[in-house]
Image (cartoon, helix red, strand yellow):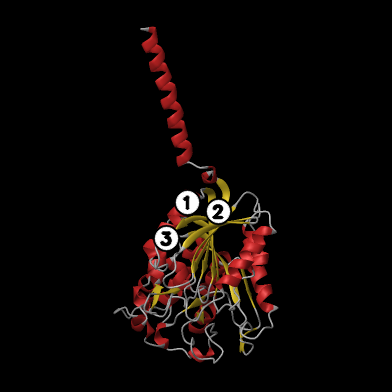
Amino acid sequence: MKKFRYIFLLLSVVLTVLSACKESDDNPPYATTVSRTVLVYMAANNSPALPHQMNYNEMVNAVNSTNLNGGRLIVFKKTSSNGMPELIELKKDQQITLKSYPAGTNTVDPEVMSEVIADVQSLAPANEYGLLLWSHASGWTSPIRSWGQDKDFTGAEREMSIPDLADAISEKQFRFIYMDCCFMGNIETLYELRNAADYIIASSTETPYSGMDYARNIPEFFATTLDLKQIVANTHDAVASLSRNGDECGISISLYDMAKIMPVQNAVKAIYAATPKKSVDISSIQQYGFDQLGSHWSNYFFDLRHYMGCITSNATLLNNLDNAMSQFIPLTLHTDKIWQKFPLNNAHGVSVFIPESSNLQSIYHYDELEWYADVVAPYFFSTSTAH
């Protein structure tokens, strides 16, 4: 009997050890929770191509020379139509592939983005997360490219609409989202993404071909005390100092406190409700959307505060809007001009579309946005004439 008890005890010990080994394999050391994980989501299979390799190398160099303070920088990137996207962790002198995805994966599919975010949260758990969206973008307008661009095997361009982007990232509660892409500092996109992050950094204008200054901002993303205003200032200063051909577009870039967007919505609705519908001379309103030729992106992105001031002179309503915007936009910086020829004299940091300026609301799916349903439609397209 003692012999059998000994054998049973020995088997129990062996099974316990094997079980412990299995748990260790399922929870490798890299799954340890850290203070902050930042995901750079690079939808880089573009036409015209953006400098994905240059920016990636800048990230590598920044990590090699920076203390991430225990944080983790993860890059998801796909650079060709039949390429195999990879989830790569950048460490000092190391680039570690955490996961590979099927060749041809559509990186602007919201389900793919949701899967990648879930993978990052599993493989690189953290107390808080940052997200950097890297690609082409066209603000709320769709179909053009909205956010992201990924060519398929035939060369056809695919995009992600702003509602799809919201579906992919909302409720994830990122500490911050930085948008290294054009025209995302518009009230329509921000309103759609109001549940996605505590703070968003985005540009109302086009952004330079060369992208964000990664050497300056990667260290800031991992600072013990996160200073998002400094990140905004770094980008503005880098763009303002550019002198290379093609990079002289200028910029308007802002920090948005997403917990404060609803008072802005309420202030705009109050102005609409108290103001009889009337046509305005849109040529007199500050725009952000001029390209080098001065026309391609015009009449899409007007300055929200300047527009409100053009449709009402009610000091109380405008003061309410100003107070709300000062809370919503803790910092906005801009160069003097766009493309060195279009002044930004009346730039307040966030754009809006004026429906009566064109018929874009139906052509480019403006009427599918929550800002349209909650704010625009009741004013511009209500059957009621009372204001």
Rounded to the nearest whole Å, what is the CA distance between mark 3 and mark 2?
A: 20 Å
Image: 31 above or below 222: above
> Do residues under tags 1 and 2 come within 8 Å of each other at their CB atoms?
yes
> Dot 1: within a 10 Å radius of its alpha carbon, few (fewer than 14), some, or many (20 or more) residues?
some
Dot 3: what SS? loop
Whether residue 24 appears in this view of the structure is: yes
Rounded to the nearest whole Å, what is the CA distance between mark 1 and mark 3?
A: 16 Å
Give the residue pinned by disc 2: 37
Camera-side residue of 385 and 237:
237
Give the residue pinned by disc 3: 101
In the rendering, at what x and y percent does residue 137 appear? 48, 75
Dot 2: what SS? strand
Rounded to the nearest whole Å, what is the CA distance between mark 1 and mark 2?
A: 8 Å
In the rendering, at what x and y percent does residue 363 appear? 35, 83
> Dot 3: within a 10 Å radius of its alpha carbon, few (fewer than 14), some, or many (20 or more) residues?
some
* Quarter of the image where one finds residue 330: bottom right
